[in-house]
């Protein structure tokens, strides 16, 4: 039976990481070491308990992490989904508890595999943790939010961020987890042979990451382009109301006409209506302005085709009109899984507009606009690095349009911006983010912020951006490399399972 003290420690360790997932941009505060510290606490708890207790400790750790890290889901359910406060709290808690089952399973697996302590700490525990983290990003359409690797995209970068262009976010998670295991081994073994091994391992991982940060994986192509990213700051509770539509149209018309940028990007569903219902004279005004600037506008709205609805981005301007349709949809928010059984939840309990959309397809062409080859992703799609790289190395620029107004003034928008920074780092491409209420930002190819707008204010973010060509190792092999590395670690641990400690 677990003692209350260990439960509290596990919960607290999970909560401890959360500040590293919502860093204050341009602040001198650096929270990236928290992930290594928190995982080392969990691994220390795991090393001396049986598989049942290890599973529970993993669960409580996850409950702290997800409860504190994604509690903003309550805002979407209650404030904008019209769900009662009690039911919204219950659903948010159950959501956090479900994802906490993955750290619980990691705890169970590592305890199931008997091996010398140093192997458990440096191979089995890290491999089990990251394999379950990857699985969480795949199962039930995936929820990779709060993957440990994101914590290393800090203000100036942790050395471990250097692994992102090579192994992706899960590779960074693996380096965090190995470092956590080595730290526990160092504190336990001190200056014995194993302690010296642990110290050498920590230096090697950090030093290699720092060297990898110096690598130039991609090369500039073409001339820099002037861009403008529009943030209309339309309140979510008014966004889909018919009586506010004229004001929304006027806001974005005004912001577009004020810009002289060659590429102008509007947020996700900036015009919250079907494309064929949009006033033709309105679209013509935008098109002519883009042509006057010698470029193009990317506009977010809905499209209908063959009785199916798509969340889309389409272009207006000098180039032939092109569109991208969102492919990776959010369960319940954008499509209803098991519709005959669960349709009542959306239609009867939640009031989410356009909640039964169709997928746009996995292999859509990049958009040739403003002299760039642009890979567009909509909202939640940038959480999936393995999907973003489908458009590379062809794309020279990444663009994310989103609407995080669903989550109010919580940390969700900053967490989402951090995720986009990881996508830039993995791909060696600049990322442009146009959002409704924030965080609207221009992200350099190394994941650092070039410029951003304050949240919850109307504004236009302008800047010069550079297109890039070439492939990072992660673009070439995706998650296959880190999964093979995990398999090798577990295989080695299994072969060494009977050796003396």
Image (cartoon, grey):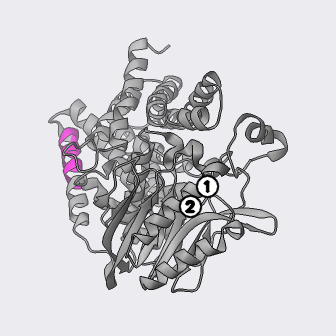
Q: Which residues are magenta?
A: 194-205
Residue 117 in sight: no
Which residue is nearer to you in this view: 287 or 389?
287
In the image, 445: left or right of 111? Answer: left
- Above or below, 483 against 87 in this view is below
Question: Is disc 1 in contact with disc 2, using a CB cutoff of under 8 Å?
Answer: yes
Q: Residues within 10 Å of mark 1 (few under 14, many from 20)?
A: some
Residue 404 badge: none
- Name the residue carrying label 2: 249
- Above or below, 171 against 113 in this view is below
Quarter holding residue 83: top right
In the image, 66: left or right of 162? Answer: right
- Name the residue carrying label 1: 245
Element carrying mark 1: helix
Quarter occupied by the C terminus? top left
- Where's residue 480, x and y in %? 50, 63
Q: Residues within 10 Å of mark 2 (few under 14, many from 20)?
A: some
In the image, 476: left or right of 447? Answer: right
Residue 199 falls within the magenta-colored stretch:
yes
- Where's residue 221, x and y in %? 34, 85
């Amino acid at each position: 039976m677990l003692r209350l003290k260990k439960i509290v420690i596990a919960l607290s360790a999970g909560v401890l990481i959360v500040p590293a997932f919502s860093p204050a941009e341009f602040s001198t505060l650096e929270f990236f070491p928290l992930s290594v510290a928190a995982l080392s606490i969990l691994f220390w708890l795991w090393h001396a308990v049986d598989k049942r207790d290890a599973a529970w400790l993993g669960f409580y750790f996850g409950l702290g992490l997800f409860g504190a890290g994604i509690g903003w889901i309550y805002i979407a359910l209650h404030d904008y989904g019209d769900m009662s406060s009690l039911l919204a709290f219950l659903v948010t808690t159950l959501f956090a508890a479900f994802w906490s089952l993955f750290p619980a399973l990691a705890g169970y697996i590592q305890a199931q595999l008997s091996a010398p302590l140093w192997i458990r700490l440096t191979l089995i525990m890290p491999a089990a943790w990251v394999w379950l983290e990857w699985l969480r990003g795949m199962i039930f359409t995936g929820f990779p939010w709060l993957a440990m690797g994101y914590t290393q995209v800090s203000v100036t970068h942790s050395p471990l961020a250097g692994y992102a262009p090579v192994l992706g976010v899960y590779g960074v998670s693996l380096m965090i987890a190995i470092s956590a295991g080595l730290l526990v081994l160092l504190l336990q073994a001190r200056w014995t042979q194993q302690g010296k091994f642990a110290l050498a391992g920590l230096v090697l991982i950090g030093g290699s990451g720092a060297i990898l940060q110096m690598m130039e994986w991609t090369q500039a192509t073409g001339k820099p382009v002037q861009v403008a990213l529009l943030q209309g700051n339309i309140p979510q509770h008014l966004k889909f109301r018919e009586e506010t539509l004229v004001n929304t149209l006027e806001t974005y018309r005004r912001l577009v006409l004020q810009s002289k940028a060659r590429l102008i990007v509007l947020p996700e569903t900036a015009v919250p209506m079907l494309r064929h219902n949009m006033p033709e004279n309105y679209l013509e005004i935008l098109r002519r302005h883009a042509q006057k600037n010698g470029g193009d506008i990317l506009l977010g709205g809905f499209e209908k085709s063959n009785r199916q609805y798509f969340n889309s981005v389409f272009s207006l301007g000098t180039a032939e009109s092109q569109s991208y349709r969102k492919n990776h949809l959010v369960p319940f928010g954008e499509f209803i899984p098991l519709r005959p059984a669960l349709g009542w939840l959306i239609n009867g309990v939640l009031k989410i507009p356009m909640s039964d959309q169709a997928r746009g397809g996995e292999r859509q062409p990049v958009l040739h606009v403003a002299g760039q080859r642009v890979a567009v992703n909509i909202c939640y799609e940038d959480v999936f690095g393995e999907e973003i790289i489908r458009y590379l190395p062809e794309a020279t620029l990444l663009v994310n349009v989103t609407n995080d107004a669903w989550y109010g003034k919580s940390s969700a928008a900053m967490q989402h911006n951090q995720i986009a920074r990881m996508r830039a780092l993995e791909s060696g491409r600049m990322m442009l983010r146009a959002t409704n209420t924030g965080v609207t930002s221009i992200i350099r190819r190394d994941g650092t912020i070039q410029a951003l707008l304050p949240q919850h204010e109307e504004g236009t973010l302008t800047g010069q951006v550079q297109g890039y060509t070439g492939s990072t190792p992660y673009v070439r092999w995706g998650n296959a490399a880190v999964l093979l590395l995990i398999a090798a670690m577990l295989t080695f641990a299994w072969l060494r399972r009977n050796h003396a400690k």
